[in-house]
Image (tube, rainbow, N blue to C red):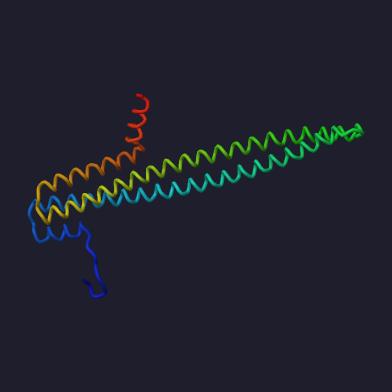
Amino acid sequence: MSGHGFHVHGPHDHAVEHVAHGGDSFSNRIAVMTAVLATVGALFGYLGGATQNDAALFKNNAAIAKTTAANAWNYYQAKSSKQNLAELAAELPGIGAQAQAKYQADVARYEGEKAGIKKEAEKYEAQSDEWNAKSEKALHTHHQWALATTAEQIAISLAAITLLTRRRWLLSATYAVAAIGFALGAFAWLHVDPIGALLAGGAAAH
């Protein structure tokens, strides 16, 4: 405890403190490993936060594109209503040739405008789908980074317990959990989904 409050030690702090008072090779090896795991875990945590921010940004872009597409479709419907009215007016009995020609010209103009509006709306809908797909992919990668970070944190805790109990089998467990964390981090970095690939392969086999 310091003069201004409490200081909470993490597993790595305890490991280093233990080594400072121990000095044996077993403790030194675990302390170095713990420092490496802490560094890697911090990197995984940062990358996980970055991908989470990307997912939120992509989802926001998808919502903007979807709203723009909806506005375009509303405009398209408005043009369709005007076109229908112009078509109806052109078919009214007793209407003069000049007025009929005007309404028919309006029908043709609305038809051309609708084509452009439809193309614009479809473009923004496609953009919305693309942004949603990017968001889902980034969110999945974020979950992979989060799992990798958790694995490294568990490995650090196991390393601290190993120092306290000096159980050799716990050291093997620490290595195993750390290796799992590294593998999960590699999958996230390479954007590989092994579980999804296995499920897809099983579905294709059936």
In the displayed structure, does residue 3 sit left or right of residue 112? Answer: left
In the displayed structure, does residue 67 sit left or right of residue 162? Answer: right
The quadrant in which the C terminus is found is top left
Depicted 137 relative to depicted 34: above or below? above
Residue 145, image x, y percentages: 33, 46
Residue 2, image x, y percentages: 22, 72
Q: Residue at x 52, y 44 (%)?
A: 62
Task: Judge by depth and name the residue closer to the eye, 42 or 70.
Answer: 70
Task: Judge by depth and name the residue closer to the eye, 50 or 55.
Answer: 55
Residue 28, image x, y percentages: 12, 53
Q: Residue at x 15, y 54 (%)?
A: 161
Residue at the extreme top: 205
Q: Residue at x 9, y 53 (%)?
A: 166
Instruction: Name which quarter of the figure residue 91 lies in.
Output: top right
Residue 175, image x, y percentages: 18, 44
The quadrant in which the N terminus is found is bottom left
In the displayed structure, does residue 22 sit left or right of residue 120? Answer: left
